Every structure is written in structure tokens, then in C-alpha cells.
Image (cartoon, rainbow, N blue to C red):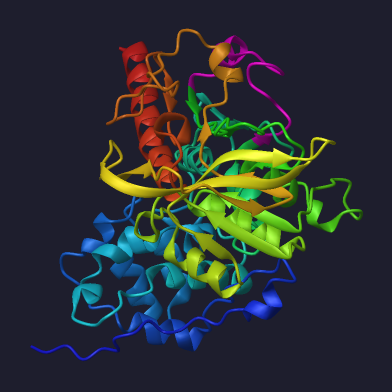
Amino acid sequence: MAVNIPDKKTPMKEQLPQERIRNFNEVALGYSEEEAVEEAKRCLQCKVPLCVRGCPVNIDIPGFIRQVRERNFEKAAEVIKSYNNLPAICGRVCPQENQCEAQCVVGKMKNHEPVAIGRLERFVADWEAEHIGLKLPEIPPRRSEKVAVIGAGPGGITCAADLAKLGYKVVMFEAFHKPGGVLIYGIPEFRLPKAIVEREMAYIRALGVEVRTNVIVGKTVSVREILDEFDAVYIGIGAGAPKFMGIPGTNLIGVFSASEILTRVNLMRAYAFPNYDTPVKKGDNVIVVGAGNVAMDAARTALRLGAKSVTVVYRRSEQEMPARLEEYHHALEEGIKFHWLTQPVRYLGDENGRLTAVECIKMQLGEPDESGRRRPIPVEGSNFIIEADMVIEAIGQGPQKILLQDFPELKLNKWGYIEVDPETYATSVPGVYAGGDIVTGAATVIEAMGAGKVAARSIHQYLSSKVASEKS
């Protein structure tokens, strides 16, 4: 039987490029009720929903979309929140095109785009916040066991919320002065407004989760003190230590890591200096190294800080770019330039040690490497110079060492990340679990959340078994 549905997603309104490059307001403006219902009608309500398999937290996607289609938005929110504690965030920053929407049957039909699952999730979460406010699930009586969650990023938040819903006393420890992890310090305001993160955190606190900020586990409090006080521990500290290429000139004034720039701007509101006390370097001609989501965020942030030109250089081609297509298209619309198959080899400076230019070399692609992408190979004699007064390297991040150095019993892999059982996320230390970037290296928000959900179930099973054995 032929299915007659619109081939394109219902468009979502956005700020115009010429306007948004002068502010840090959210670019995408969301669906109206009518637009959400129209888009929900594109869903086929598959009996075997492949989209759910593509979701790391296994949301009942057809179920919530059906409720949207029937204009039962409150019920749609209940469906989503039974799986996902942070829907307003996931609806904005998840790479749906590689996950749920990649599996959508509509998207596999000739000339059809998948159902806009992410946009619908965002709509439902925002509708609930506007029309209902804070709505909590029924929580069972408080258990006696206490669980510590180290790191208030998306994985830690998810683990803490799921355990709180089961009745556990949960305490989160966060090194920064605000919880949220990469949601608050890594993702720019124009992609994820901080008010949204704070709204979602209010829900987590209302579940009974205690959040202790400005606590560096391994310094402010020792790992041993945590292990003595709590019955189980989840480690979700991310991978926030910046990596540099280490080429000549890296120490010149004007060479930064993306994590430093984004943390200053996002968490510490440096873009509003002097209204906020955090200054930030503002370049005229900015080079961003890398082509992942962090690189797009850094490039678009530099532009909003007042750069006259921003150029992204990437050693592979456009086809190998790891960034979300949506972020890439937004960057193009905003006038950011791209040099593909280009690798910096040296930073040049003046007599005062300030960056003046970047020497690059052209690359060509060879055979695939361990990542599955074709290996970039330098083209001899193809060096050229790009003038720049600021470089932002966005080439990845590594594990923070403070907690790990205070926890020698914890088994690490050869890259310095925590080794876990892939089924349970249990570490080498009984009662200690870990997930997210500190286990996998840099990944997505929703993948960290998926790890947090699995770890919460594992912790529940571990503590329940322990209680049962003590009673017998």
C-alpha cells in the first residue's frame, strides 16, 4: 500500500545568519504546536521501530510522537521522561542524523527525509516547561544506601537521576561552580542556552539529588573519603584535558585550546566582559584546527566575539568531517571559511612572541587508518602561509589525571581511560562504576547518558544483591 506523506521535514524557524553572528542567542527557534503536530503526522508508527534501536537511551519514539500527533503533549512528555531525564538538551544537541533518525523508515523511502525526531523531542520538553512546569514521577521510599556520582556532566546527571528515582540518596560532586559538565562549559549558548541546562538541573535536584559544586575529587576530597562514605560510586568526569599538536610555535601568545576558549565564554560569560569578570582573547583573523563539533563551536564563537575572518583547517576532506551537518551548514551560512586537506606545521610569531601567521601543508588521502577514515599524507613542497593573530586547536581532549592519580587501584587502558565491563560499566574496584568520555574518549552527550543509565541499573543490582546477601 502506497504511503503518502510529505517528503521533507517540517521546517524549523531560525535566526537569520546576518543577525545571529552578532549575538549569542539560540539559533534554532523551535516548533509551534501546529508545526509539531504536522511533523508528527509524518511518522509511520512502525510495528518494529528501528528508530528506537538507534537511540542510546531507547526512548519509545513512536509512542511519544503518537501523543504529539494527538495533541496530548503532557502525555508525550511523560513517555519521553520515563527514558530520558534531559529531553530539552537532547532535542537540541544530539546527533539524531547518526542515531534515531538514521534508522527512520521514512528516511529510507526514496527522496524522503526522516521524521524530525530531535525537533519533536525539543518541542515536547519546552512545551512541558512552559505549560506544566516541574512534574516529578512517583518515587519509592528512601533507601538506606548512598551513592556518589563524581562529575555532573550528562552521564553523571543521568545516573544520579535514575538512582534517585529508585529511592537512593545520591550526592553529585562537581569541580566547577555550576553543574552540567560539557553542557554548561563546552556547548555554546547559541546552541544550548544555559537557562535550559539550569531548568533541567532543577528537575534533577527536585528528584532528591544533592549537588556539591567546587569539589575536586582527588584534591578537595580524597577518593578514599568518598569510598568510605558511600556504598557505590559512579565516575563520569569526562575527558576535559586539552590536546595540542605540539608543532613549533605552540607557546606563542594567541595559540589556545578550544576547551579554554569555550569554557571562558560559556561557563564564565566572557563574551559579556566587563559585565562579567572573565576576559577572553578576541582575534581578528582566527584559524580553528579540526572539523568536529567542538571546532564548529569554537569557530562560530570566535565569529561572535568579533573576528573579521574565521577559517577552519582540517587535514582530511569534507566527506571525513566528524561535525554534525547542521552545525557545518550553520557555519557556512555565517561566513566561516574552510580549508580541506590542510595541516598546520608551524606557528609564526613576531619579536614580542605574538602569533602572526600559520604555516600549513596540503594533504592527500591514503589508505584507511585505525579510525576507518583514509589516512592524511603530506604533499611535499605544498607549504603555504595563512595570516592569523589567533589559533584555536580543537583536535580532541584527554582524561583528567587528578582523580585517577588519587585512585591507583583503578585499572586504566593504554590510553589512560578507565577500563570497564562493557555490559555493566563496572570498574576493577567493586562498587565503583564509570562511563562517558572518561571510558570511551570524546563521544556524544547521548552516548554518555546511555552509559549513565546502564551504570545506574548495574549499581541498583549490585546494592540490591549486597543487601539481600547481608539479610540471608
Q: For the C terminus, give its image quadrant.
A: top left
Q: For the N terminus, give its image quadrant.
A: bottom left
User: Number of marks in the image?
Assistant: 0
Note whether residue 196 is visible. Answer: no
Front residue of 50/417: it is 417
Query: Is residue 472 highlighted in magenta?
Result: no
Q: Position of residue 269 (x, y in %)?
A: 78, 52
Front residue of 370/29: it is 370
Whether residue 225 sits left or right of residue 63 in the image: it is right
Q: Position of residue 318 (x, y in %)?
A: 40, 60
Q: Position of residue 12 (x, y in %)?
A: 50, 81
Residue at 49% in and 37% down: 167
Whether residue 382 sits left or right of residue 202 in the image: it is left
Q: Residue furthest front?
A: 381
Note whether residue 69 is visible. Answer: yes
Task: Please say if 139 is above or below 30.
Answer: above
Q: Residue furthest right?
A: 274
Q: Position of residue 460 (x, y in %)?
A: 38, 30
Q: Which residues are magenta?
A: 211-232
Query: Is residue 216 highlighted in magenta?
Result: yes
Residue at 33% in and 59% down: 98
Task: Please say if 35 is above or below 175.
Answer: below
Front residue of 262/275: it is 262
Residue at 35% in and 14% down: 471
Q: Quadrant of residue 451?
A: top left
Residue at 63% in and 77% down: 17
Whether residue 71 sits left or right of residue 311 in the image: it is left
Whether residue 144 sits left or right of residue 277 in the image: it is left
